Amino acid sequence: MSCCHYYALADGRESAFSIDISSITFGPGVLGELGEHARMLGMTRVALFTDKRIGTLPFFASARESLHRAGLAVAVYDEVRVEPTDRSFLEAARFADEGKFDGYVSVGGGSVMDTCKAANLYATYPADFLAYVNAPIGGGKPVPGALKPHIACPTTCGTGAECTGIAICDVLALQVKTGIASKRLRPSLALVDPSTAYTLPGEVVAASGFDVLSHALESYTARPYTARAKPERASLRPMSQGANPWSDVGCEAALKLLGKYLERAVGDAADTEARDNMMYAATLAGIAFGNSGVHVPHGMAYSVAGLVREFRPRGYPQEEPIVPHGMSVIVNAPSVFRFTATACPERHLHGAACLGADTRGASSADAGEVLARHLIALMKTTGIPNGISGVGYDSGDIEALSEGAFAQQRLLTNSPRPIGKNDLAGLFSGAMRYW
Ligand SMILES: [Fe+2]
């Protein structure tokens, strides 16, 4: 056990935690091994998921070539929508169902990997869309059994979706972002090739890097697993089980790498050491949050991304307004950590120290401020907008932002400090601008 954080056991409280992870192969060039890995997993007829942009890139061609060299039949699905919806998930599932595949490969960012997870699920165990979606929006039906093998190959150093059993989408009719969460959705193998991220614009590395950073900080400061009620039986133990000693290890390691490499990776595309380490940090943080869950900054991010009006960040396609996921998360984070620090100040301070903040002489009462200030300094040096006003919001939006975030109870209940709707309004106010 890493510290006394977990020893406040009370009657009826959880006393066990689970560790579920994908197999992982990591290193520059491993995408060239894809075919052999697919064959070792028993695949003969492969559905290869990507999006229109990545489908034109040389590393995608070499991934497909590797599958062909291994003698596998391959059908490409490149209709994945960035920010998937229930409709786009179901279209992908129809492709999967008609193809009668015995294996799945996803090459892309979180949208591609999540769409592939959902297609695998609905083609293997058909059901009404909302059946598997998280309650209370959906039925929260357990996935009945194992899915077909899935090799997930991330191409941004951010989401960690290659290591999680979560698939996120918008439910169009309800105008809400939610998802499906099950250990069964976790890819069989994460094939992580950092060379796919060498050509990303610095702005994209910054946004995705802050997604990683917040995964690690939120997992590390999440409500401890020992604070949950003991489940009636093992199968009811949630995947987002709260902070636990296993996830702590990945969080601390990821934060140290981010402290060392984030600014370098954003500032210099030729710094492959930095970009390799950012990708490894993303994988470590994905392993961590896949077993603990994130909390308030991610819950607030759903609103910040979902209610966007005109914001078009540099480095991203300009056709549609968008607040990139990692950016929509980190603009909330300093405000949130100022608020949550009272629940576990030592963890907020240690998180800041892992990132490289000078915490000498800091007391528990300083913890939230020390962490927030360090994050704000990093945001400034890497070109992140100045809070939610920097992505187009003003005080007139706070009610709608709070309303949307309050619907994310799965994330809010993982907060170390209880969060009501009024608290959210205060947190959005605090996130309006930082400098
Ligand atoms: Fe995230």
Image (cartoon, helix red, strand yellow):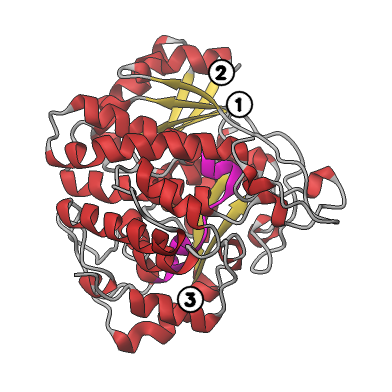
**Residues at marks 3 and 2, CA–CA distance in whole angstroms:** 44 Å
Residue position marked by numbered label 2 in the rendering: 44
429 on left or right of 13: left
Which of the labelled discs sits on residue 404, or is there none?
3
Q: Residues within 10 Å of mark 3 (few under 14, many from 20)?
A: many
Residue position marked by numbered label 1 in the rendering: 102
Task: Locate the N terminus by quadrant.
Answer: top right
Question: What's the magenta region?
Answer: 288-303
- Residue sticking out furthest to the front: 361
Q: Residue at x 32, y 50 (%)?
A: 210
Across and down, in percent, residue 59 comes to 27, 25
- Circle 3: element type: helix
Q: What secondary structure prevails in the magenta region?
A: helix
Which mark is nearer the camera, 1 or 3?
A: 3
- Depth check: give the residue in front, 138 or 231: 231
Q: Is residue 428 above or below residue 277?
A: below
Across and down, in percent, residue 164 comes to 54, 41
Q: Earlier in the sequence, mark 2 or mark 1?
A: 2
Q: Are marks 2 and 1 in contact (CB under 8 Å)?
A: yes
- Circle 1: element type: loop
From where the camera sits, is residue 255 visible? yes
- Circle 2: element type: loop
Across and down, in percent, residue 428 comes to 38, 76
Q: Earlier in the sequence, mark 3 or mark 2?
A: 2
Q: Is residue 312 above or below residue 232?
A: below
**Residues at marks 2 and 1, CA–CA distance in whole angstroms:** 7 Å
Q: Residue at x 55, y 68 (%)?
A: 408
